[in-house]
Amino acid sequence: MFYLTTNIAALIIYLSAAGYLLTLLVKYQSLQQQWLFFLLSCATVLHGIGIYYQVVTPIGVDLTIVKAISLVIFSINSIVLISSLRKPLHSLFILLLPLSVIGVTLATFFHQHSSLIAPLNFGIGAHVILSIIAYSILAITSLQALLLYWQHNRLKKRQLTEIIKHLPPLQTMETLMFELLLVGVILLSGSVLLGALYIDDMFAQHLAHKTILSIIAWTIFSLLLWGRYQWGWRGNKAIHWTLSGYCILMLAYFGSKLVLEVILA
């Protein structure tokens, strides 16, 4: 099984990158972003190859919950790596590395019955791809919100740890969060629109909860953006709205899979 080799190689590199980052933080040394970027790029490429061979089969797409989680983490890592070339997003690796290790480990060693989806037409395929990208960007937004919340509390208590020193200023962190949120909402809007155009019945029994929860999450994110640009919402209010919307979106994407494939399996 080719995916086993690539997944294990990706896992080793993710662990090496996590160990490298932890060592720097413990020894109070400055972060060598180029070296970390190289390690994560190698791991992400191997991760992508592995998840491709796990998900894409001759008879359809096999997207169990652990493979879906691994696919989303791969998408998140790819977006953060590319975006970090222009934006100060390297601080997110503090949270992404443990998630990457967990995601690859589950996809490699936690075996489930196949959850095959028949080959998709162009419209449905575009809807699925756009949904994954939108979900990934909004996941990055929520991670940024968590870091912002932690950074704000530590600065307020004057607890300047080494990790805090590696983070961009609060205003930069908050601006990045809203930039990511705007992109995520635009893509989520496109995903919902494509679903309405190409899915025969978006409120069918097996899709109703996904549709309703996705629309609720979209509404929360949109209201937050409106509040930001109309009334200058920021700080804890913005963080709480972001995390609330993401939790609802996560239920929309993974709630039914968790119940059907894990709890009731």
Image (cartoon, rainbow, N blue to C red):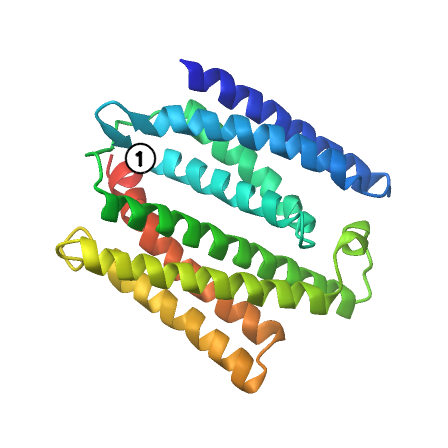
Q: Secondary structure at mark 1?
A: loop
Residue at image position (63%, 26%) is: 13
Picture quarter with the C terminus: top left
Which residue is farthest front? 122
> Could you classify mark 1 by the number of other residues whose Cα lies within 10 Å: few (under 14), some (14-19), or many (20 or more)?
some
At horizontal 61% and vertical 46% (from top left) the residue drawn is 95
Q: Position of residue 193 (x, y in %)?
A: 28, 62
Q: Is residue 13 placed above or below 179 in the rendered structure?
A: above
- Does the image show residue 208? no
Residue depicted at x 49% and y 61%: 183
153 to the left or right of 32: left
**Which residue is tagged 1?**
63
Q: Between residues 163 and 39, which one lies in front from this camera angle?
A: 39
- Measured as percent of width and height from the top left, residue 255 is found at 32, 50
Question: Residue 239: x, y in percent?
Answer: 56, 68
Q: How many marks?
A: 1
> How far across and down, in percent of the image, does residue 262 sit?
31, 37
Relative side of 178 to 59, left or right: right
